[in-house]
Image (spheres, rainbow, N blue to C red):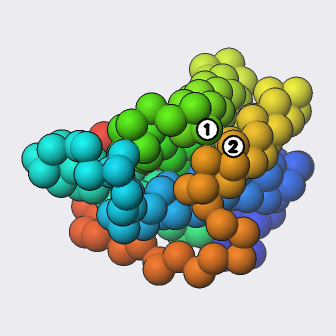
Amino acid sequence: MSERDQEEQPPGAAALRRSHAARAESAAARAAALSHYVEHRRGPAAETAGSADRAEAVWKSQHAARVAAQALAVISESAPDPAADSRCARNAAASAAQASRMGRLIDDDAEPSVAACEAALKASLAASAAAGAGRLGADGELNSEADEAEKAAVAAAERAGWIRPGQQIPSVSTGVRSGEVMSMMHL
């Protein structure tokens, strides 16, 4: 980003960037942890899923982790823009919610997994509201609600065993990112 770009940024854009980026990073980490969990889950609940169902859950969780990583990458590669940054955070949260659905499926709707999936959906909805038309990522109250919902989703994922604090999760490749695909994702 050039000095001119920095000078043209509205006041507070950098602070909003930090908030949206932190939320996107958290959601992307949740999605990556879930992808790892779904891929490596063993036990009676995981084994009840048919081979095709299990393979689909693994694929969907990996795809969700990749999309979340792409959203996070877009934030790091662009100039601060509250509207665009909030859309990236929204996309990461939506991807983490998709990965959570796969965790719930693999866990055969165990109570902690259901609660974690519901918390992930709430985080996605809160991020969507913060990024919504008319707000464009700059509404402090909606951003705070999205931040709190993300924290709740992380805590619920920990209770479900999807995330273990301190666990090193392999990084997720963003894959090939064409401008056309990124514009379709509103990034």
**Residues at marks 2 and 1, CA–CA distance in whole angstroms:** 7 Å
Report helix, strand or loop for mark 2: helix
- The residue identified by callout 2 is 156
Q: Amino acid at mark 1?
A: Pro
Lower position in the chain sequence, tag 2 or tag 1: 1
Residue 139 spot, x, y in % from top left: 82, 29
Classify 166 as above or below 145: below
Q: Residue at x 47, y 78 (%)?
A: 171
In the rendered structure, are the residues bearing label 2 and label 1 in contact, judged by CB atoms less than 8 Å apart? yes
Q: On the picture, is 78 further left or further right than 165?
A: left
Question: Of residues 174 and 51, which is closer to you in this image?
Answer: 51
Identified by mark 2, the residue type is Ala
**Who is closer to the viewer here, 158 or 128?**
158
Disc 1 marks which residue? 112
Residue 132, quarter of the rendered image:
top right
The quadrant where residue 129 appears: top right
Residue 72: x and y in percent read 54, 61
In front of the other: 174 or 134: 174
Q: Circle 1 sits in a helix, a strand or a loop, which is it? A: helix
Q: Residue furthest top?
A: 134
Q: Quadrant of the N terminus?
A: bottom right
Does residue 135 appear left or right of residue 39 in this picture?
Answer: right
Q: Compared to 40, does 67 lie above or below?
A: above
Tell me which residue sits at (61%, 61%) in the image: 163
